[in-house]
Structure formats: structure tokens, C-alpha cells
Amino acid sequence: MDAYIQVIGEANAEAMEELYMQRKNGVILTEKLDAYFTEKYGAPWIAKGEAKGIAIGEARGEARGEARGVGIGEARGKAEGIVIGEARGKVLTILETRFTKVPKRLETEIRKMTDTVALQSWVAFAKTCQSLAEFEKALG
């Protein structure tokens, strides 16, 4: 009972006591409480509650959406980083296998590349180029 009286402030304690007792006895009060508050305080009371509920719902939805977006972005970034790292490793492994030692400047150039399409073409070219100089020249 005290919670109801605190919520409505100067409400008629007898009417609230009756509603509270009905609630205790299992009577659904939503319509009666809405009618009581609408009669006592009018439509602004309902509008204020609706606005607060909408604001809370929007904030929760936005937080959930943001968390999902961050998670998806992190997963995509991690996956792309793995693909790029593997492609760089393939290029270097092929060149080292075919030509024994890859110059540091060429290795640095390969490790800087972040374009997966370019790296895939470098993998293919590393398999067929005739020399490290030809490979390096093709990189531009």
C-alpha cells in the first residue's frame, strides 16, 4: 500500500486501500488504476509515463544495437587481419623458398600491404616470377 500512496502523492487513501486489497485478492487492476489516475490527474499522467517508457526502451535498444555492431565489427576486423597476415606470410614464404633471401626493404613493402586482393595477386606472381628483381619491379 505504501508504494502506491508514494507514487500518487496526495491520493485518496481509502480508494487506494480498496484497490490494493483487490490486487491482493487477485483482481486485475490495470484498468481500474488507469481510470483512477486518469480521472485524478488527467491525460498528462499517462503521456508522461508513456514518454518515459519509450525513452527507456529506445536507450536499451540503442545500447544493444551498439554492442552488437561493435562485436560484429571486431569479428570482421579480426578475420580480415588473419587473412591479410596469412597472405603476407604466403608471399614471403614463396619468395624465400624460391630465392633463399628476401631483402629487408621488399619484406617491409610486403608487410605494409593491407589490400587482400593485391596480396592474393602477389601470391600468384611470387610463384611465377623469374627473380626477386622482377617481383619487386612489379610491385611498383
Image (cartoon, rainbow, N blue to C red):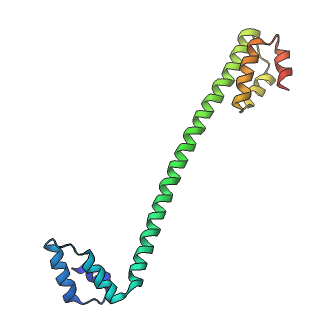
- Does residue 122 appear to the left or right of 34 in the view shown? right
Is 6 placed above or below 104 here? Answer: below
Image quarter hosting the C terminus: top right
Q: Residue at x 21, y 87 (%)?
A: 15
- Residue at 47%, 69% in the rendered image: 55
Residue 34 x %, y %? 30, 79
- Residue 91, compared with residue 71, is above or below; it is above
In the drawing, does residue 106 fall left or right of residue 56? right
Query: Depth check: 36 or 138 in front?
Result: 36
Residue 125: x and y in percent read 76, 17
As rendered, which of 43 and 90 lies closer to the eye?
A: 43
**Viewer-proximal residue among 48 and 140:** 48
Q: Is residue 126 left or right of residue 56?
A: right
Residue 60 point in image, percent of width and height: 45, 60
Identity of the residue drawn at 58% across and 33% down:
79
Which quadrant holds residue 135?
top right
Horizontal relation, residue 17 to residue 76: left or right: left
Position in image of residue 69 (x %, y %): 54, 48
Residue that sits furthest to the left in the current view:
25
In the rendered image, which quarter is residue 82 located in?
Answer: top right
Tell me the quarter of the image containing the N terminus. bottom left
Q: Quadrant of residue 38?
A: bottom left
Is residue 46 or residue 86 the one in the foreground? Answer: 46
Please determine whether, in this image, residue 5 is positioned above or below residue 73.
below
Q: How many marks?
A: 0
